[in-house]
Image (cartoon, rainbow, N blue to C red):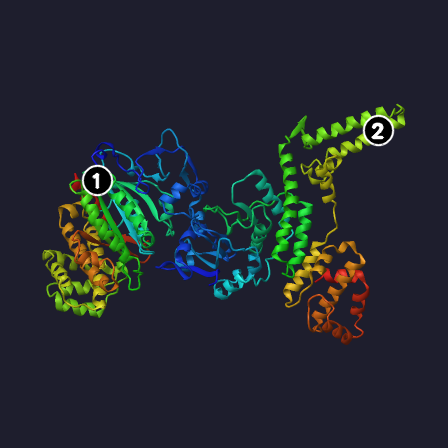
Amino acid sequence: MSSCAPFHYTYKPDVGMTASLGDLEYAKLLEAMASGLPTDAAWAGGGPLIWQPPGVRRKLVGWLRGIGSEEFGRAGAWEAWGVLVPEDFDISYWPWFWNRFAAGPSSNLRQLAKDFEFGKREFPPPITIEFSAILADLYAAHQRGETLPYNVPLSAPDDVGLLAWAWLLGPADPSKAFVGPPRRGVAAVSPPLSYSGLIDGPLPGADQPELRAIVGRLIDDGVYGGTLAKKVVSLRERVKGAAMHTSSDAASRDETEPQTIFGLSIPSLHRSNVWNGLITLLLLFAILLLLGIRRDGSDVKSVTAQLRQKMEKIVPTDTAGNSGETGTLTAASTTTTATDETATVRFTPKPVNPALAMKVREYATGHPPFRFTPDFVKLAARSNERNAKDMHALRVAALQMYFFDKGWYQGDVDGQLGPGFLQAMRNSGGDPDLARAVSDDDFVLTWLQSH
Amino acid sequence: MGFFDLFTSREIQCPLCGGAESRPTKNLIPFDTLRKQLAAEETWTNAHNAPGGVPDLPDELRTAIGTPAMPSLEEGMEGEHRRCVKCKSLLPPQFWQAGVAQPLAMTVTGSVGHGKTTWLLSLMAPPMSSRYTIIGFNERHIVQSYEYAEPYTLDMLDMNYRSVIPFVLMGCTIHHPDGLVDVRTMDIMGESFTTKPQEVAQRVERHLTGRRGGGGMLVVERFSNDADARMVPTIARTYLRLATKIREKLRGRSTLWKGIVWTWLDEAKWSPAGEQWLRSHTPTASDAFLQIGASEPANIGKLLAQYEKIRDASDKGLVELLRAVHSKTEMEPEAIEALIALLFRLQILYSAYVSDRRLNRLEYFYGGSGQRFVMICQELAKQLYIRWDAPRGGLSAVLTGGDADDDWKVLPCARLTLPHMKPESVWSDQIVIEAIARAGEMR
């Protein structure tokens, strides 16, 4: 007997909630979650549902949408479909069934349940680079001990997929985390959701470079949909490390009281950073004295310069209140603790070009079955480095896309120079753009950007 | 009840958990804050049989009414809102206040889309002026309702919103020339009977017997040829069993009355089958009935002469019709439906006549011949309901079976939609009249 069973509940006028698949009892338990979902055209598609109702030993994994009163003449109707799984069933790859859940109940739900049970995963939802800021906020909320659910701000229906990524990478343990669809109000359900999509919720706070880099890499991997759940789950630890670091920084910044002198605000100072800086300065003075530094002008100048340099690092120069990461992080790097040293290494900025990766991904999405290998997009995201390896990958991609556009492409389109590609290249003969695509780096980049 | 209970038992204030004590709440808080708090309050979710939490308002309702303020969960020193100490449920004043008003408990249930909430609101917050009432409302005769029906407000429920909490408590006080009646109501989702009948029965029993005063068990049933009747037999079985038990428990203290609120009668269609049946079974007033039955509700005002004709003959024709329906003669379903259409037209004709002749509604009903006409219509509704419901196996069993209970009453209700007019409930004040009458019996 299979452990995953399909369910489909929907409202019927004069009958109420009905179950075409599954036990209607679950529908009753879902009422509080389902009521109040948006039904306007943009958001009527609903969103993901991962929840274990109270008192039952099964989880609902699927999709939930509200039905507008114009459809059945009654406000507060809804529809849900998906798979019912035992509570201990590993659902870590549910985001890889995203398209099938989102496709609606008309798809073969029995087959979906079978495929879900045997892990025949497909593609996760798209992820945007802005998600890194959301992720940072989720961890900050977690650090502050805010009550559940943590809100994932959604500005457009395409953002709904971020709920799946929040479930995968957010602070709550995915094996116990619950997700509900987008809404404008509060999801007052028991047990509470871990993440709830808040339509037009407040924009996320400051971004965090390392999280941004991680998300950038995920964007690349997402092109193929081949990223395994295990890999993403292992990525959680890195995300957690980076986000917790930022959160503790943010928490420390929160402790800082705003200061004004003659009515003018001055940059916020982190108390511990100030103390650390002062201690460092005192040590420096002591060393200088011990070394018997002469009190002539040049030495004083040199020490002053050093001190100014140190102070500039401790006190951020940005007065816009956004003292931010640069100041804080640099200050942290001046201290001698192991943690801070690690932080300095972590925050070494890397040139990234996620826009280019997005372009390629969009291209691949719009031209099925066109695909790129994970390595390619990874390289494309770092294409500003312009090293030979990166350029080779980009050149291959440009050639493939070029051939694909011309209709010359045959055989596989998986990012490798397969036999079909080579045959097409031989047949194309003497095309001037082709020659440039092979040799001119700028052309390759421009060409990719323009697609 | 044991010997010691006679000295120690207190009246139950909260029928949901059996709590006998309530305390004031501190202040009002936003609806969303309360919802979050209630979802985490296990005693509340258990008492309301809503383990999944508390529903949100659909967007369209939020736009219309905003975010209401609700009585908080925090205890205060004094205030007009009180919560059960045991389960934290918000109790309308009629559940805890003492005073001169005659208390009366009611439970109301029904299947999805049968008009339960619409009908309940016509009791809880009736419009001050309606052309199709029996007694209507005026400065001497008003209904003062408690605005909260946690987790909702009456405003929310008034917007055709699908409420999904299995048990909702409401309260109102009827002011009438002879006194006050405190009506405390428990609204029960029909689906609850099929899933947890024992829990429903326990709450109904507590509600109807937990405090002084009598009780009423009402079921809202929709007239429709394709109305869903799946839950009705279960409701009927539970109520029959409960009625016997509760009647014994109330013996000597107060009365128990039962009713079927038969809604959507305006959907019934007139047909030649009805015409033929009337010609052969009601010779006295068949012409009048045929004219009334065949008329459009919008033109009913033109038939006042037919109404007078029926009434002038001491309702002889009406009684003849009632007897014929009550008899065991065969009736085609089309003929039954046509007579339901006729019944609906007779109801609006009554109200139109009172309006047209500028009669005092109260006097015409209590002092004139109105009450007799209304009672005959209610009895006709009962007989038609039995015939209509028999094939579907609904509540007609409680009216006719071996353990039939004669005390069941059928209250015919409908909504009249006329061109360029807002829809109006027809005879929606029947329950107010019943409540006043039952309170009078208990005094």
| Chain of the residue where label 2 is placed in the rendered structure | A
Alpha carbon separation for disc pair 1 and 2: 93 Å
Amino acid type, mark 2: Val
**Residue B329 shows up from this direction:** yes
Label 2 crowd (10 A; few <14 / some 14-19 / many >=20): some
Residues at marks 1 and 2 touching, judged by CB atoms closer than 8 Å: no
Q: Give the SS element for disc 2.
A: helix
Q: Which residue is mark 1?
A: B213
Q: Which residue is mark 2?
A: A303
As drawn, B143 above or below A10: above
**Residue B127 shows up from this direction:** no
Residue B98 percent across, percent down from the top left? 26, 33
Viewer-side residue, B275 vs B355: B275
Disc number placed over residue B406 in the picture, else none = none
Going 73% across and 61% down the picture, which residue do you hit?
A448
Amino acid type, mark 1: Gly
Residue B26 percent across, percent down from the top left? 40, 32
